[in-house]
Image (cartoon, rainbow, N blue to C red):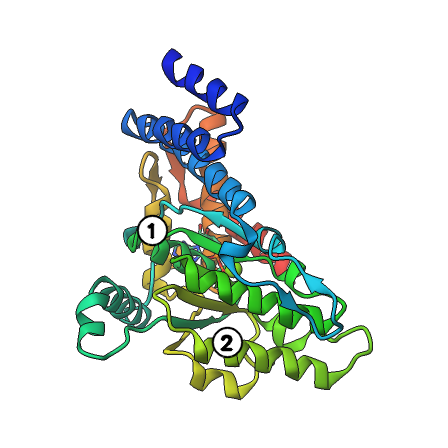
């Protein structure tokens, strides 16, 4: 908990309306909480500070005003509506990946860990990723892992706020976002990226949709900073082919293989004993489900065990939970 001294400082800075010093005391408290093992609370405090900084940042210092195509000025303070920011704690060890994806993500991380060396030689590290594949296969999770591994904040672009009825406004907002990206190093996730490529304007004007997509591509080409841009989508097919060439890596995610199913299940039963009597039967019952669905079934089994105070979980019980989840797919 915050010391009496820190509370007094907070009140003093509040009275003087000194936002910067107020937030710096909050960060000190967060660092202290993290040290004594209250990592979740510490992370929540840090996230609150990051969000507050987005609000307090002087608009002019972030990016110039932009003028949308319908000539209404768009204030940069929209930027905080456009992102949510977090400091993920997931590590590379937490995510289960195929060898191919793992190799690509490691190369991405290594190039960014050595970006100074690479840039000194006139080269540019990989900075733009496109992740695609079915829901629940680890695309969003990968963005969190990358942010954590590179000690960067994760800014998730809120596509619902970005996509307005007026496409001209959307292009202007995209420009504001890229201005921000250029001045604030971080990992920027455009989740459900396909909505840029597909959403129709109010007039259903396909030309407008193309214009937004072209704005995005142009901004991506022009992006010079060390920030990382990750786009993720469940619907690869509806994306424009022109897009693929513009990313440094295009990575396909899939539902888990048999080996990954077992890895995932075992990773969820660390504190509980799962009695596996027939491995093949267990794998078969999970086959076809996503990582997210299998994880949920495992967590359901653990919750059941907790409620009933048992330390061992029978494979039969897990299978019935997996089957329950499979029945939702029909
Ligand atoms: N490859 C994976 N390894 C371990 N857990 C995973 C994996 N993919 C998904 N999960 C679990 O499912 C949750 C949802 O996955 P998410 O990354 O949001 O999927 P996507 O973005 O591909 O739809 C994650 O928070 C994680 O708990
Ligand atoms: Mg996702």
Q: Residue at x 42, y 57 (%)?
A: 184
Residue 48: percent from left, percent from top: 49, 37
173 relative position to 100: left or right: right
Q: Nearer the viewer, residue 77 or 123?
A: 77
Name above or below for residue 311 compared with residue 211: above
Q: Residue at x 47, y 76 (%)?
A: 220
The answer to whether residue 138 of the structure is visible from this angle is no
Q: Are marks 1 and 2 in contact (CB under 8 Å)?
A: no
Q: Residue at x 58, y 51 (%)?
A: 80
Residue 131: percent from left, percent from top: 45, 70
Residue 170: percent from left, percent from top: 66, 69
Q: Which residue is mark 1?
A: 148
SS type, badge 2: helix
Residue 104's tag is: none
10 Å crowding of disc 2: few (<14), some (14-19), many (20+) = some
The image quadrant of residue 310 is top left
Q: Quadrant of the N terminus?
A: top left
10 Å crowding of disc 1: few (<14), some (14-19), many (20+) = many
Please tell me whether mark 1 or mark 2 is closer to you in this view: 2
Residue 219's tag is: 2
Q: Residue at x 33, y 63 (%)?
A: 97
Is label 2 within 8 A of ligand 2 (CB to nearest ligand atom)? Answer: no
Q: Quadrant of the C terminus?
A: bottom right
68 relative position to 37: left or right: right
Give the residue at the far right of this rendering.
203
> Separation of disc 1 and disc 2 at Cα?
25 Å
């Amino acid at each position: 908990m915050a010391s009496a001294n820190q509370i007094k400082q907070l009140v003093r800075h509040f009275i003087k309306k000194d936002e910067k010093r107020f937030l710096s005391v909050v960060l000190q408290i967060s660092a202290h909480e993290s040290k004594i093992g209250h990592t979740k609370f510490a992370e929540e405090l840090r996230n609150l500070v990051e969000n507050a900084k987005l609000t307090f940042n002087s608009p002019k210092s972030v990016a110039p005003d932009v003028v949308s195509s319908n000539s209404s000025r768009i204030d940069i303070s929209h930027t905080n509506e456009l992102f949510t920011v977090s400091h993920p704690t997931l590590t590379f060890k937490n995510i289960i990946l195929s060898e191919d994806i793992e190799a690509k993500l490691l190369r991405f991380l290594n190039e960014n860990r050595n970006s100074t060396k690479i840039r000194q030689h006139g080269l540019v590290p990989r900075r733009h990723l496109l992740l695609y594949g079915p829901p629940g296969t680890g695309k969003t999770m990968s963005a969190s892992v990358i942010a954590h591994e590179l000690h960067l904040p994760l800014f998730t672009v809120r596509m619902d706020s970005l996509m307005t009825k007026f496409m001209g406004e959307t292009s202007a907002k995209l420009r504001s976002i890229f201005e921000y990206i250029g001045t604030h190093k971080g990992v920027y996730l455009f989740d459900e990226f396909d909505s840029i490529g597909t959403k129709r304007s109010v007039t259903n004007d396909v030309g407008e949709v193309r214009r937004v997509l072209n704005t995005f591509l142009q901004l991506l080409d022009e992006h010079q900073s060390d920030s990382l841009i990750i786009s993720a989508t469940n619907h690869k097919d509806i994306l424009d082919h022109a897009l693929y060439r513009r990313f440094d890596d295009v990575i396909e995610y899939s539902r888990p293989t048999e080996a990954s199913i077992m890895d995932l299940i075992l990773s969820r039963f660390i504190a509980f004993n799962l009695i596996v009597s027939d491995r093949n039967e267990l794998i078969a019952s999970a086959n076809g489900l996503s990582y997210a669905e299998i994880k949920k079934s495992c967590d359901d089994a653990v919750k059941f065990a907790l409620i009933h105070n048992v330390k061992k979980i029978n494979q039969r019980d897990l299978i019935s939970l997996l089957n329950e989840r499979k029945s939702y797919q029909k």
